[in-house]
């Protein structure tokens, strides 16, 4: 039985509009213009008008709302087997009505999906482990002498062994925070995935090399500077421009590690 007209929600793009019932049935759509012939018109004639429906097969309860003051309609179905979420919107007259599960990102649709924070935390954990492994491998291959966990650890303790342990966990926490920042960028821009993650990671690496690295001698309590030699407390060699004091391959290692980090976060979040 077709729902009453007041039980329908409107989804449109300024050129045409669709009416979607609480049960997930698209009962009215003129496309591509308001005055175009209807593609679905079950709201007028249940037998001949035609409709399109997405809903659980058995009995269910549903609720719906527009997302973040947009024209994106989210309908949630709850049934004995679990929960189903459907997002519907009209982007423009060149795109058909789109139904997609929560969490799916589409370029140009900022804020159109809820952030999966557990997945973001997992992505940060995995991405940080991969980044640390790449840097450790580069050290073992003598491509660089820089160790971000060690530099972090020595900011808290002068003991070399304790610095490695403290730095490892500090690096994990740091990676989680940056992963959440990456996911926030994905959510705001409406872009996601490994490619966009690689782009954000590249920007992150550039900031690290051009901004963070030059500041290290000023903020690290145990690092010497180019203007003041080593002291009894400040014995760690400064990284120099682009961290080249730690090896000529260091900038490339930093860029590669952060690009891979971004790819992992983008793919898993």
Image: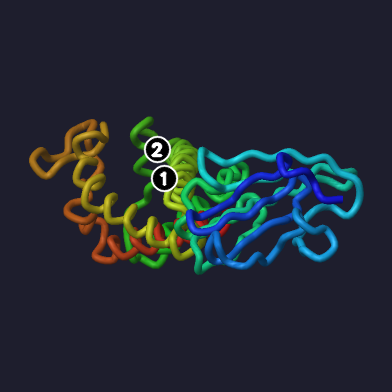
Q: Left of 146 or right of it: where is 140? A: right
Secondary structure at badge 1 equals helix
The residue that label 1 is drawn on is 149
- Is 137 placed left or right of 87 in the picture? left
Q: Position of residue 109 (x, y in %)?
A: 48, 54
Count of numbered circles on the image = 2
* In the image, residue 155 above or below residue 42: above
Residue at 8% across, 41% down: 227
- The residue that appears at 37% across and 51% down in the rendered structure is 147
29 or 240: nearer the viewer: 29
Q: How is the image coloured?
A: rainbow
Instruction: Give 4 or 225, whichever is nearer the viewer.
Output: 4
Write the residue at 40% across / 37% down.
153
Q: Few, some or many C-alpha atoms within 10 Å of disc 1 (few <14, some 14-19, many ≥20)?
A: many
Q: Dots 2 and 1: beta carbons under 8 Å?
A: yes
- In the image shown, does 260 or 235 lie closer to the viewer? 260
Relative to 143, is 149 above or below?
above
The Cα atoms of the two marked residues, 2 and 1, are separated by 6 Å
Percent coordinates x, y for residue 118 in the rendering? 62, 42
Q: Residue at x 26, y 56 (%)?
A: 246
Numbered label attached to residue 153? 2
**For residue 53, above or below residue 150:** below
For mark 2, give the secondary structure.
helix
Residue sitting nearer the eye, 266 or 101:
101
């Amino acid at each position: 039985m077709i729902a009453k007209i007041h039980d329908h929600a409107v989804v449109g793009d300024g050129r045409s509009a669709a009416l979607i019932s609480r049960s997930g049935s698209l009962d009215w759509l003129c496309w591509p213009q308001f005055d175009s012939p209807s593609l679905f018109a079950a709201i007028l004639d249940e037998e001949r008008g035609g409709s399109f429906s997405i809903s659980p097969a058995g009995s269910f309860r549903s609720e719906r709302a527009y997302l973040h003051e947009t024209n994106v309609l989210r309908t949630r179905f709850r049934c004995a087997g679990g929960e189903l979420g459907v997002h519907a919107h009209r982007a423009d007259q060149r795109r058909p009505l789109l139904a997609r599960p929560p969490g799916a990102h589409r370029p140009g649709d900022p804020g159109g999906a809820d952030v999966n924070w557990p997945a973001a935390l997992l992505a940060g954990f995995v991405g940080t482990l991969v980044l640390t492994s790449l840097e450790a491998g580069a050290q073992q291959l003598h491509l660089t002498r820089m160790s971000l966990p060690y530099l972090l650890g020595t900011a808290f303790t002068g003991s070399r062994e304790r610095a490695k342990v403290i730095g490892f966990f500090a690096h994990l926490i740091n990676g989680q925070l940056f992963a959440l920042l990456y996911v926030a960028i994905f959510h705001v821009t409406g872009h996601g995935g490994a490619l966009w993650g690689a782009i954000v990671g590249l920007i992150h690496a550039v900031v690290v090399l051009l901004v963070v690295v030059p500041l290290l001698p000023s903020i690290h309590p145990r690092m010497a500077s180019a203007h003041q030699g080593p002291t009894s407390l400040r014995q760690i060699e400064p990284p120099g421009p682009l961290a080249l004091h730690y090896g000529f391959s260091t900038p490339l290692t930093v860029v590669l590690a952060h690009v891979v980090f971004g790819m992992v976060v983008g793919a898993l979040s």
